[in-house]
Amino acid sequence: MSITANDLSQLSINTIRTLSMDGVEAAGCGHPGTPMALAPVTYQLWSEVLNYDPASPLWPNRDRYVLSCGHASMLIYSMLHLSGVRKITAEGKLTDEPSVSLDDLRNFRQLGSATPGHPEFGHTTGVETTTGPLGQGCGNSVGMAIAGKWLAARYNRPDFQLFNYNVYAQCSDGDLMEGVACEAASLAGHLKLDNLCWIYDDNSITIEGRTKLAFSEDVATRFEGLGWNVVRVADPNDLGALSVAYDAFENCSDAPTLIIVTTVIGYGSPNKADTSKAHGEALGAEEVKLTKEAYGWPADAQFLVPPEVTEHFQNTLGQRGSEAREDWEDLFAKYQKAHPEDAKDLLQMQRRELPTGWDTEIIEFPADAKGVATRNSGGKALNAFAKKIPWLLGGSADLAPSTKTLLEFDDTGNFSADDYAGRNFHFGIREHAMAAAVNGMALSGLRPYGATFFVFSDYLRPSMRLSAIMGIPSVLVFTHDSIGVGEDGPTHQPVEQLAAARAIPGLVVIRPGDANESVYAWKAALENSHRPTAIILTRQNLPTLDRTKYASAEGTLKGGYVLSDAEGGKPDAILLATGSELSLAVAAQEELAKSGVKARVVSLPSFELFDEQPQAYQDEVLPPEITARVAIEAGVRQGWDRYLAGRGAFVGMDGFGMSAPFEQIYEAVGITSAKVVEEAKRLVGK
Ligand SMILES: Cc1ncc(C[n+]2csc(CCOP(=O)(O)OP(=O)(O)O)c2C)c(N)n1
Ligand SMILES: [Mg+2]
């Protein structure tokens, strides 16, 4: 087929293609071939289908566009540039500047540009989620579609169709090979999310070569089996066929849609058969020239944007989007009058605020030596806060009876295909898709949580990491947090997961030491409007400390605090502990006192929160001159040394646990108050 730029569509498509080629060429790296092939698919979506106003990129009922194959980032950057999406500052101010300028395209992958190697949420306006790790965008899109359904069910009223947006995700072979996308697709099919459309770039090629090397399943049949509506487009350059496919999505009302588009990577390039050229590599000046000639493009022009093209996007996407957005704003103004409370909720959600007074009543647990598992107290805290925060919602990966994360008050309901207003989610045994969907929900203004056993945090770690990169308020509740799991044995006993979670920059990890600390752990998580939180809770009972004798659990908000000081306030030694080991420290303190060793107990539920306190406070809690320190935690030592003043001791795990009643395991691995006493005495020379 010869390509001539004889109409606006073709001109626009070739502009997307050549911009992508030029961007990758300038950077000297990137993936040019995929944007070149997908240009018509994306062009047709943006110009004819997407309800999106480039002049108001955060309009709440906008359609969401996710580029799950984030390696094709020049595609989204070209679209953002050509459609004139305006930049929103870090403070949330809409500006007249472009989100992606021509200079940004020229500076693809360079320091400070709006065009990093993979699309980054919060960095480039119009990027709805950070993608690059294949499969994640697919998972996020399911969360966004869930959020759309939930918002519609909760906030739409007769005559007020506030929410009816669609979510479109472009995905590649790699996306569909990844487990997370399959889990997410299974969930989406089950939930009949008809507002979700994935557009699959079926180009039969990945980095190592033809997909037949490793991928021979029938994707269409798989997705039909998952309950999806599957549509095929044989030629991506057939805009009519693409229109028919997008119509088929819009007309399908009981399932998500997969549009399988058969494409040829590096379309138009004379060396398109050379797969390495299309993957992770610039085409090279000569081939760029030849390809531009094949497109009927001035061979030597670079970053050429014909003014008709930007105008064309204004007249299509821009026009349609601004009308839809203005209609919506009129509707919302009326809604504010008719349903002021609901409107207030929606505005607060957009600003990531919580309802006034959400934290005025903090539940309290009375002192109790027998105590309660923090999963139970955490569940009570969650319920108490959720009563005040209508958009705090979530669920578990089939473990709610164990994670205690069910919302149990009136009007919560189960989120299902029959009731999109439910606040209790059943994610199924799909931890990874759960966390990816939770991210998508958080990106849509909700305050979502997902829950599972802590040991299975490894199954969802990539999504947890992305929540931290994006700075979004996803909450993960991890119960069964240590060898305290007991009889289930080492496969179910997290040992290295605390260190691993703490290693993720920006993720706040909180392991409360008793019931009252678990309440403040939730409070801290909810206050984290711009970063994710992992709350780590026990299966076994922990004594509820007598807070008239010990310091207030509110210290949890500072990450660490002096729970119980040595008599006279001049300790010989400091005992630091988190979670279930806090009571061991308290017992050791009493024991040490009998031998004349004055010990201070520091509860350190969150390294991250503690480390961001003023140095003076940190020194007050951990005076630098007191170097006789013992840390106690039923996990590996990694990460603890910075609190041990160079010579302190660590009482914890250096291998895996075992299957037995938990008290016996603690004895067997030597995490006991006797061991703490022994180490403290050794350090103070007694
Ligand atoms: C989880 C994950 N694994 C590996 C990679 C590295 N990677 C980038 S693109 C790619 C595969 C490219 O093939 P495909 O997904 O079909 O995209 P196409 O090249 O066809 O655009 C791989 C393995 C990645 N980005 N994410
Ligand atoms: Mg491919």
Image (tube, rainbow, N blue to C red):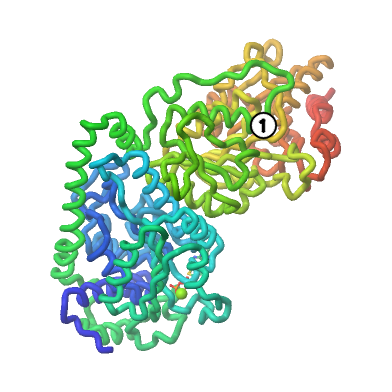
Quadrant position of residue 4: bottom left
Q: Position of residue 184 (x, y in %)?
A: 50, 57
Say which quadrant the C terminus sits in: top right
Quadrant position of residue 589: top right
Q: How many marks?
A: 1
Query: 436 left or right of 431?
Result: left
Write down the residue under mark 1: 579
Q: Position of residue 275 (x, y in %)?
A: 46, 82
The structure residue drawn at horizontal position 28% and vertical position 89%, both measured from the top left corner, is 1
Query: 154 left or right of 96?
Result: right
Q: Position of residue 651 (x, y in %)?
A: 77, 35
The structure residue drawn at horizontal position 37% and vertical position 69%, both measured from the top left corner, is 27
Q: Position of residue 84 (x, y in %)?
A: 21, 59
Query: 152 left or right of 662?
Result: left
**Is residue 141 in sight in this rendering?**
yes
Above or below: residue 219 compared with residue 533: below
**Is residue 470 in sight in this rendering?**
no
Above or below: residue 93 compared with residue 568: below
Above or below: residue 599 compared with residue 294: above
Name the one closer to the observer, 552 or 203. Answer: 203
Mark 1 neighbour class, 10 Å CA radius: few under 14, some 14 to 19, many 20 or more: many
Query: 588 left or right of 538?
Result: right
Q: Amino acid at mark 1?
A: Gly
Above or below: residue 253 compared with residue 289: above
Question: Which type of secondary structure does the marked residue at label 1 adopt?
Answer: helix
The structure residue drawn at horizontal position 60% and vertical position 23%, both measured from the top left corner, is 516
Name the one closer to the observer, 248 or 277. Answer: 248
The verdict on label 1 being within 8 Å of ligand 1 is no
The structure residue drawn at horizontal position 59% and vertical position 28%, both measured from the top left corner, is 518
